[in-house]
């Protein structure tokens, strides 16, 4: 039985992506930004297809849909924009800092703030939990590189794991650009500190790399100047909304988060998920779209010039729209067979690509024809790149005073030790992804199997 999903959106990135995410969900379920239902959904058939928004929304006595979402930031501007655009958010679920000036791109500030305010955060979470009959999953939207999404996000992971360890905890985590110089110099420190918590406490982390997102945006829309993150956030939100499509429009397969995550994450040591998408084109059928999902151009954490990744698990979603219906079984089977033959799998898994036939609900024509979510070894090179950038700073102990309580040698040493533990943990994950390419991988990991 599918259970409810509670969302936590934290920091600028978390809340901006979160806003687009709820925009996707409301379109699919025919809900207006104020939480009321659309009077007449676009097509007669869609009237029957409102699915199960109740897993993601509570419904008030006056029939308004309210996202099961908690909005957290240490400065007010992003959340106040969200509340204006989507008055459906519950104002009681907003947590803002009284000082209101952010965590200054510093994980430590975000984490300490979270720690001092944990009772209030727990109250917010408990209130949402109390509204669920059968809570399944917490999902966090954040960036790993600033101060709030990374620091408060890390604390939330610890709190959730501590209090709700049996529930699924997933994250949609945005990794920083290396190409945009405007991004902040201490981002590698914040990223490494956050990654440690993701490794320890998340059950599945969807990794989105801002450089790859920018390049997909350019491929799809040309160099068109969209406002800062609008295009990238639409890409992330399409993927994150689509992941739960079969929960919200249940059919006979993958109608719970548990079933999706157990396919994607066969062992807790391999839990970093890569996504890609296929743009919608009326000339493409199911077979073409399944192959387009393999196109490097549309991968959301691409690393150039590496050996071919090995796949641990792959789920493709076909999302119908316009003339394209995604129900032609022979084209789907042809596409699955070709995808399976083109991908290289680790030796201990079945060479299989699962396909979920999504439902567009009340959405008019989706911009994308499908997504792929997969667990594959390319993540090891993403993490190695992060560690290289981290090492450049850490070997000189550059900017370490941002993270210390005072600048004594002892305190600097203590912080470097913490950073090193995080680095070790990331190296451990890289080793897991390297080791899983061998047939005896599971023999070594018997204790870790779910
Ligand atoms: N894709 C995407 N990336 C974003 C967005 N907003 C910020 N980022 C990236 O996230 C990182 C900075 O994190 P923010 O989310 O702005 O920081 P924060 O969590 O609000 O933390 P502080 O402002 O330091 O308190 C940088 O790498 C930005 O490029 C967004 O809306 N979309
Ligand atoms: Mg901020």
Image (cartoon, rainbow, N blue to C red):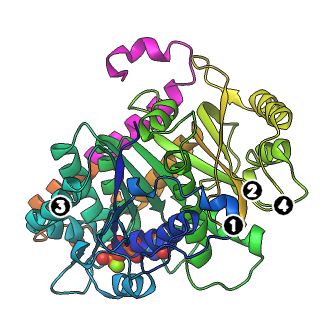
Q: CA distance from mark 1 to mark 2?
A: 8 Å
Q: Nearer the viewer, mark 4 or mark 2?
A: 4
Instruction: Decide if residue 113 is on the left or right side of residue 225.
Output: left
Which residue in the protein does label 3 denote? 127
Which residue in the protein does label 1 denote? 215
Q: Position of residue 392 (x, y in %)?
A: 43, 60
* Ligand 1 - quadrant of the structure image: bottom left
**Quadrant occupied by the N terminus:** top left
Question: Are the two marked residues, 1 and 4, in contact with CB atoms closer than 8 angstroms?
Answer: no
Q: Quadrant of residue 14?
A: bottom left
Q: CA distance from mark 3 to mark 2?
A: 42 Å
Neighbours of disc 2 within 10 Å: few (<14), some (14-19), many (20+): some
Which of the marked residues, 1 or 2, is nearer the chain's N terminus?
1
Which residue in the protein does label 4 denote? 281
Q: Nearer the viewer, mark 3 or mark 2?
A: 3
On residue 297, the disc is 2
Q: Which residues are magenta?
A: 421-450
Q: Quadrant of residue 10?
A: bottom left
Q: Nearer the viewer, mark 3 or mark 1?
A: 3
Which of the marked residues, 3 or 4, is nearer the chain's N terminus?
3
């Amino acid at each position: 039985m599918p259970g409810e999903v509670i969302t936590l959106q934290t920091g600028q990135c978390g809340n901006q992506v979160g806003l687009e995410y709820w925009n996707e969900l409301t379109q699919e379920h025919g809900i207006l930004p104020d939480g009321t239902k659309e009077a007449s959904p676009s097509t007669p058939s869609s009237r029957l297809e409102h699915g199960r928004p109740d897993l993601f929304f509570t419904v008030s006595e006056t029939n308004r849909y309210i996202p099961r979402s908690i909005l957290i930031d240490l400065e007010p501007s992003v959340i106040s924009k969200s509340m204006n655009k989507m008055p459906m958010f519950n104002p009681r679920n907003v947590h803002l800092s009284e000082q209101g000036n952010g965590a200054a791109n510093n994980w430590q500030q975000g984490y300490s703030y979270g720690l001092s305010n944990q009772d209030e955060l727990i109250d917010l979470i408990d209130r949402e939990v109390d509204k669920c009959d059968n809570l399944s999953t917490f999902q966090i939207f954040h960036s790993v590189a600033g101060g709030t999404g990374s620091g408060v996000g890390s604390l939330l992971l610890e709190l959730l794991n501590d209090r709700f360890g049996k529930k699924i905890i997933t994250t949609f985590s945005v990794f920083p650009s290396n190409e945009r110089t405007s991004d902040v110099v201490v981002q590698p420190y914040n990223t490494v500190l956050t990654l440690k918590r993701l490794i320890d406490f998340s059950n599945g982390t969807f990794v989105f790399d801002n450089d790859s997102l920018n390049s997909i945006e350019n491929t799809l829309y040309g160099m068109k100047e969209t406002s800062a993150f609008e295009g990238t956030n639409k890409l992330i939100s399409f993927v994150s909304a689509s992941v739960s499509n079969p929960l919200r429009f249940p059919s006979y397969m993958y109608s719970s988060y548990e079933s999706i995550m157990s396919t994607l994450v066969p062992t807790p040591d391999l839990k970093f998920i890569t996504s890609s998408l296929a743009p919608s084109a009326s000339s493409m059928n199911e077979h073409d779209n399944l192959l387009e999902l393999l196109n490097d151009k549309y991968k959301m954490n691409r690393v150039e010039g590496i050996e071919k990744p090995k796949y641990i698990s792959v789920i493709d979603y076909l999302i119908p729209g316009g003339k394209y219906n995604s129900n032609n079984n022979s084209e789907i089977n042809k596409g699955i067979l070709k995808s399976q033959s083109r991908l290289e799998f680790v030796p201990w898994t079945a060479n299989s690509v699962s396909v979920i036939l999504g439902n567009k609900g009340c959405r008019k024509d989706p911009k994308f024809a499908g997504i792929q979510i997969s667990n594959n070894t390319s993540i090891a090179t993403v993490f190695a790149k992060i560690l290289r950038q981290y090492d450049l700073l850490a070997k000189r102990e550059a900017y370490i005073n941002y993270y210390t309580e005072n600048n004594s040698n002892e305190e600097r040493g203590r912080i470097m030790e913490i950073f090193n533990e995080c680095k070790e943990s990331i190296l451990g994950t890289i080793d897991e992804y390297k080791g899983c390419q061998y047939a005896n991988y599971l023999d070594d990991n018997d204790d870790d199997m779910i």
